[in-house]
Image: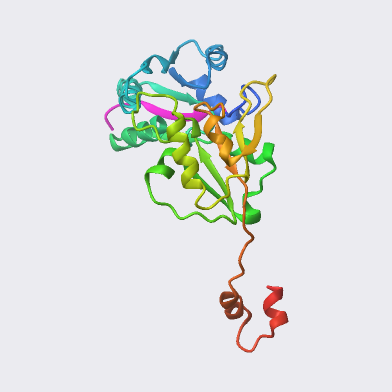
Amino acid sequence: MQGTGRLACIGVGMMMGAHFAPRARDHVTSADVVFVAVSDAVVERWVQRMHADVRSLQPHYREGRSRHETYADMVATVLDAVRSGLDVCCVFYGHPGVFATVAHRAIESARREGFEAVMEPGISAADCLYADLGVDPGEVGCQHYEASQFMFYKRQLDPSAWLVLWQVGVAGVRDTGRFNNTAHERSLLVEKLALDYPLPHVVTLYEAATLPHLQPRIERLPLSGLVEATLSQQTTLAVPPVAALQRDVDMLRRLAGPGASGERIRAI
């Protein structure tokens, strides 16, 4: 052990105040220093009221600067405080392990250097999506992909399950200093989705509510309308199933056992 520093990465959930768990609050109030990377300035000021030394990580973001460089600087800032022997808490909106590169990298680096590092879960945008859209991922299954990764790599979709694409507002953006995509990039995403879903298929644009007085964004439109839709970095695309589940008759027969009747197989 190089010092007495510790690191806790916690999530405040998606909605300010409503999703903040007691264990996460304890980490904030007991820390020597608190770093914050949350959804907006209102949430940041709310965290500042809980501790005397709250430092924003937002200044690391700059127009035209690579997100990779920004994340690296954030991790370095957090680790410097840990190495100095401080009990450090990093506050993220949502879940600190969901679309939170900085939290994962900071924890990995701290542990590699011999420091204690923990992550406390929070309510993520996925949890809010399930509630607001009435989606049960256990009913027919649910596939989750980051939208750009989905475009850059070959993935095999199952059109009988839900498809959730995160960050569709930057889908296809390869310049990591840019924070919105073009109509051309969106059209290529639609083109790829159209291999499995018809263009009139109704999809949903979703954004979780982050403040108590706000409502979630739930906008339904045909898949073809995605090109001209209003999108942000927070926008998620939810695509409902377009095909029925296909029974694996051979597997069902094997599960039923030798000599099972057709009625027994259908009952499984």
Q: Position of residue 83 (x, y in %)?
A: 30, 24
Q: Is residue 4 one of those drawn in magenta?
A: yes
Above or below, 250 against 178 in this view is below
Q: Position of residue 135 (x, y in %)?
A: 66, 45
Q: Residue at x 43, y 52 (%)?
A: 155
For this rendering, which residue is in front, 261 or 196? 196
Judge whether residue 101 can be spotted in this image: yes
For this rendering, which residue is in front, 266 or 58? 266
The answer to whether residue 207 is left or right of residue 75 is: right
Q: Residue at x 30, y 20 (%)?
A: 84
Q: Is residue 218 one of those drawn in magenta?
A: no
Above or below, 90 against 130 in this view is above
Which corner quadrant of the image does residue 50 belong to?
A: top right
Q: Residue at x 68, y 73 (%)?
A: 268
Q: Position of residue 232 (x, y in %)?
A: 52, 26
Q: In this picture, which residue range is highlighted in magenta? A: 1-12
What's the image's color scheme? rainbow
The answer to whether residue 267 is left or right of residue 206 is: right
The answer to whether residue 76 is left or right of residue 24 is: left
For this rendering, which residue is in front, 175 or 15? 175
Which corner quadrant of the image does residue 149 belong to?
A: top left
Q: Where does the N terminus fall, quadrant-wise?
A: top left
Q: Position of residue 39 (x, y in %)?
A: 52, 22
